[in-house]
Amino acid sequence: MKSKKIESIGRMTALTQEEVASHTRTVVQGLEALRNEHNSILNGINSTLASSHHPPDSNVISEKAGIIQKSLDQIELGLSEAQIMLALASHLQTVEAEKQKLRAQVRRLCQENAWLRDELASTQQKLQASEQHVAQLEEDKKHLEFMSTIKKYDADVQDSESSMEEKKDKSDDPVVDLFPDDDAEDRAGLKRSGDFGSQASLAMSPTPPSQFAQQVNAGYEIPARLRTLHNLVIQYASQGRYEVAVPLCKQALEDLEKTSGHDHPDVATMLNILALVYRDQNKFKEAANLLNDALTIREKTLGENHPAVAATLNNLAVLYGKRGKYKEAEPLCKRALEIREKVLGRDHPDVAKQLNNLALLCQNQGKYEEVERYYQRALEIYETKLGPDDPNVAKTKNNLASAYLKQGKYKEAEILYKQVLTRAHEREFGAIDGDNKPIWQVAEEREENKNKVKDSAPYGEYGGWHKAAKVDSPTVTTTLKNLGALYRRQGKYEAAETLEDCAIRSRKETETGKFNVRS
């Protein structure tokens, strides 16, 4: 009996939810039928008792009615429990449906999460690439803002310092702001044709940014709306990126002519810029046309004696000089000199720069009398206004010495070279005495003692030798080479070798920051 009950319970627990609900409905139907039957019996008993007030077996009938009522109550209880079970089954079905729905949502969310992860990874890669690009743009921006603080361009200083200067090898550039002095570049020192553009050392190279900006607008302030474009063009041109600089200039010219008309100072500014870009590309014809156009505009709008007019005249003279057209360049240079003398005064240092330009033009035409006069006047201005230690003094002396060399005046050139070296030595190492000698004196002593055993007087004993090699000045290095070349021409090979060796060591000292005295 007990085992059968366990088996029954086991069978019941093995039923599925649907089967339990189905059986429960069947039981409900049976209980409802049983309840109806009990109600019918109970009603019959109650009718019997009502029809007879005191039947002989009333107690028995009442007892049966009580039993039936209890059974009816149990049936009602069973029905209530069955209804609860059906309601619970319905709720479980709803819960299961909701569970399936949630599972579907979870699967969809997992798929979306995987997609979002892929998108995030892709976005992170793009972000890294963008950050690298932004970093590069920041570097470019810093590079392009080098002239952002410039508000006005000084007429003569800016123009003459660079417009007449070619960028050459650092160790071989003997002059400052003019046409390069050829003499220092030849180790023999004395064979020069003076033909601009004919020598390899005068090959064009991009003009440095600071010089490029200086030679465009002397005495004329660039408007704010042009300054950014102006700086960009200068930057690209100084890097040799003419394929970018030229279109920028042309577009700016087109826009300016549309808004301001052709005869406007801003148009002249851009014409100057584009002309200098063309000049650096050796496109001299195009550059000359643009400079002449700019000159016409500036004369018309600013006046014939404006510093900006002198700047354009100077640029045009440079251009003719580079093409070997010295006769055409000379009157332009003279007119620029007259304007500067009138505006700045005859003793202004920038007038001296223009005198240097004019002297070199005359030198290339063999007008040595005028050359000496111009250089002497420039030298006097520099020494008076800027002092004997100003770099322009030494550079002008080198220029004048170059003119002497071309005339065969070796003694006069030698005096100037020695003056430059002596002054540089005194400025660096103090007054000259028996133990503190300038390098040229050391070289001449070695020349006098060349027949003696060299090892008896090693270089290290000549104080001026290694000191001069430590003077960090391109002009001093150039002067060493120039005087060495002059000594070699005079047959003083030991002295020449001393100076040339010192010049080489000076250049290495500048490049590496190290110096070892040869013993």
Image (cartoon, rainbow, N blue to C red):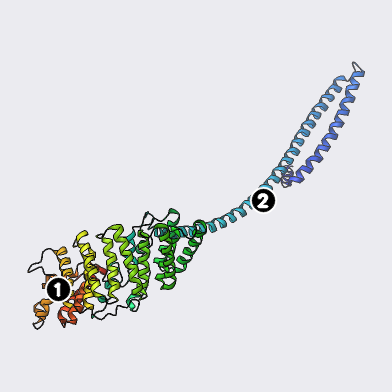
Question: What amino acid is found at the position of numbered circle 1 in the picture?
Answer: Trp
Residue drawn at 31 percent across, 67 percent down: 334
Furthest-right residue in view?
A: 51
Q: In the picture, which quadrant includes the N terminus?
A: top right
Q: Residue furthest left?
A: 434
Nearer to the camera, 102 or 16:
102
User: Residue 232, image x and y in percent?
Assistant: 43, 61
Q: Decide if residue 155 is on the left or right side of residue 386.
A: right
Q: Residue at x 27, y 58 (%)?
A: 345
* Circle 1 residue: 440
Residue type at numbered disc 2: Ala
Visible residue check, residue 175: yes
Q: Is residue 85 left or right of residue 355?
A: right
Q: Quadrant of the C terminus?
A: bottom left
Return the residue at label 2: 104
Residue 138 x/y as whole percent: 43, 57
**Which disc is residue 494 wearing?**
none
Residue depicted at x 43% and y 73%: 285
> Relative to the observer, which residue lies in front, 317 or 122?
317
422 with respect to 321 (left or right): left
Quick one: SS at disc 1? helix
Q: Residue at x 65, y 49 (%)?
A: 105
Q: Quadrant of residue 478?
A: bottom left
Name which of mark 2 and mark 1 comes first in the sequence: 2
Whether 246 is drawn above or below 343: the answer is: below
Image coords of residue 505 (percent x, y): 21, 73
Q: CA distance from mark 2 to mark 1?
A: 98 Å
